[in-house]
Every structure is written in C-alpha cells, then in structure tokens.
Image (tube, grey):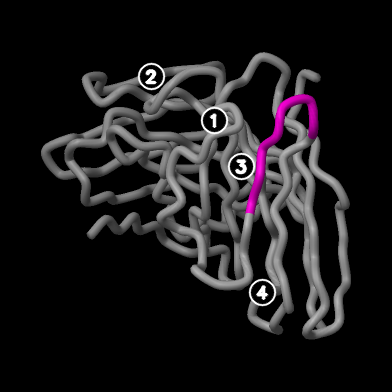
C-alpha cells in the first residue's frame, strides 16, 4: 500500500490482559519501526526491523513486550500482561532504505489499559 | 545523551507567519525533520533538511538550520487555521533508525 496501515485504531484492555497491534508497512519498504507516544507527547523508540530480522531492539522493555515481522504477514507488537503505564499511542513507521533515510509513520494504535 | 527541545506553545493570528524553534544536541545527526500531528492522528512528515544545508524552502514552509548553535526552525508563511496542530522536530541518530523527537510545539492559529 501507499501508506503505513495500523490496526486496530483503538484498543482497550484490562490490566493483565494481552494486547496485540498490527502494522502493514508501505509496499517496498524494508524497514519497520515501532514507537510509543506517552503522555506529554514523549516519543520512545521501541524496536526496528530490516525485513523479518530485528535491526535494533534497544528500546524494547525486557519483559512483556515482543515484536515480529514475518514474511507475507503484517508486523506485530504484542504486550503480555498489560499494565496501566502501557497506555499510549503506538506508532509504526516504515522506510525504504537504510539508516538516515526518511521514515513514514502510520496513524497509530491507541492502547488504553484500564 | 541526546535531547531535543522545543517551546510548548505558540499562538498566531491567521495570515501571520509562525516560527517554531528547536534545539538539538547531537551534532553528528545527518538529517533533521519536522513532523505535524493533528489531534487523534498520526505523524505527517512535513519536510526535512540534510545537515550540510542551511536552508530549505518548500511552498509555505522554510526550514533554517544553524549547525553551530544546533538550532533548527520551521517558518510557516501565511498561517491558516488548518495549520493548528502539534509540530515535532526530530533528529536521526547516525547509523541507526532511532529518531530523537522534540517535546512538540502546539501551534494555535486564531481566526
């Protein structure tokens, strides 16, 4: 597609439940990224992929968070046993080429943990 | 560590120019970006500038880069009510895809 497509747009989970978010990058883009936007607009880098391989996961919380980009499937970000502080907007982005190239963001998935 | 700072709010009258400022700390950044976020929406890439440039103009948008002072600005000419949004500057960490975002400037355009 011509844009980064994220689903669902909104997700509500009870504390302790699992949340799974999906992202389809722009067609032809090899790199996918996940960012978390919390209150006060702060953006936090989580993880990046080059095709199905993890490129940089230095922002991923060590526990509860996992992500995958499998061939012929949307990429996914999964949070096990959600906590209240996981409430945020999760943005997926993609880029065609290597580091330094412009990345394009999706519209985000708004996760609310209650 | 890297830190990108912006003023939180800016209010201008319709038709005036808006100037949104940003300071960054990583002098090795190769690209600097401006993104726009409207309420409930994603990030829209507005423009970017390569670090060896001083200025870039794109229709109503002018980006100025002062590498010595690590200062980036976005000027919006003839600001319209549709320009009301939060504007983020971002720098890319060299060799990675990490974007370091600023805190965002909320622009309010008064009719």
Q: Nearer the viewer, residue A25 or B74?
A: A25
Counting labels gives 4
Q: Mark 2 = which residue?
A: B56
Asked if residue A88 lies left or right of residue A110, the reply is left
Q: Quadrant of residue B32?
A: top left
> Which residues fall within the magenta stretch?
A67-73
Which numbered mark, 1 or 2, is in the foreground of this view? 1
Chain letter of the residue carrying label 4 = A
Mark 3 or 2, nearer chain start: 3
Determine which of the numbered discs, if any, sits on residue B36 in the image.
3
Chain letter of the residue carrying label 3 = B
Mark 4 or 1, nearer chain start: 4
Quarter in which the N terminus of chain B is drawn: bottom left
Residue B108 visible to the viewer: yes
Q: Nearer the viewer, residue B64 or A70?
A: A70
Asked if residue A32 lies left or right of residue B25, the reply is right
Between the residue at mark 2 and the residue at mark 4, the CA separation in whole angstroms equals: 38 Å
Residue B77 visible to the viewer: no
Q: Are marks 3 and 2 on the same chain?
A: yes
**Residue closest to the far left:** B68
Q: Are marks 3 and 1 on the same chain?
A: no
Determine which of the numbered discs, if any, sits on residue A86 in the image.
4
Determine which of the numbered discs, if any, sits on residue A79 in the image.
none
């Amino acid at each position: 597609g011509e844009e980064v497509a994220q689903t669902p747009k909104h997700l509500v989970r009870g504390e302790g439940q699992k949340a799974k978010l999906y992202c389809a990058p722009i067609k032809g883009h090899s790199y996918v990224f996940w960012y978390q936007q919390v209150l006060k607009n702060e953006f936090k880098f989580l993880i990046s992929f080059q095709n199905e391989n993890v490129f940089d996961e230095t922002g991923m919380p060590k526990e509860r968070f996992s992500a995958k980009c499998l061939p012929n499937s949307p990429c996914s970000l999964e949070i096990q046993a959600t906590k209240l502080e996981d409430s945020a907007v999760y943005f997926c982005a993609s880029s065609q080429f290597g580091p330094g190239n412009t990345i394009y963001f999706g519209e985000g998935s708004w996760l609310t943990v209650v | 560590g890297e830190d990108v700072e912006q003023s939180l709010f800016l209010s201008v009258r319709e038709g005036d120019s808006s100037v949104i400022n940003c300071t960054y700390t990583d002098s090795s950044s190769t690209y600097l970006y401006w993104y726009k976020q409207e309420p409930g929406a994603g990030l829209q890439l507005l423009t970017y500038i390569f670090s060896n440039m001083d200025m870039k103009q794109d229709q109503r948008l002018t980006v100025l880069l002062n590498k010595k002072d690590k200062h980036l600005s976005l000027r919006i000419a003839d600001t319209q009510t549709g320009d009301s949004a939060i504007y983020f500057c971002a720098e890319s960490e060299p060799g990675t895809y990490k974007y370091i975002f600023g805190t965002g400037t909320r622009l309010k355009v008064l009719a």
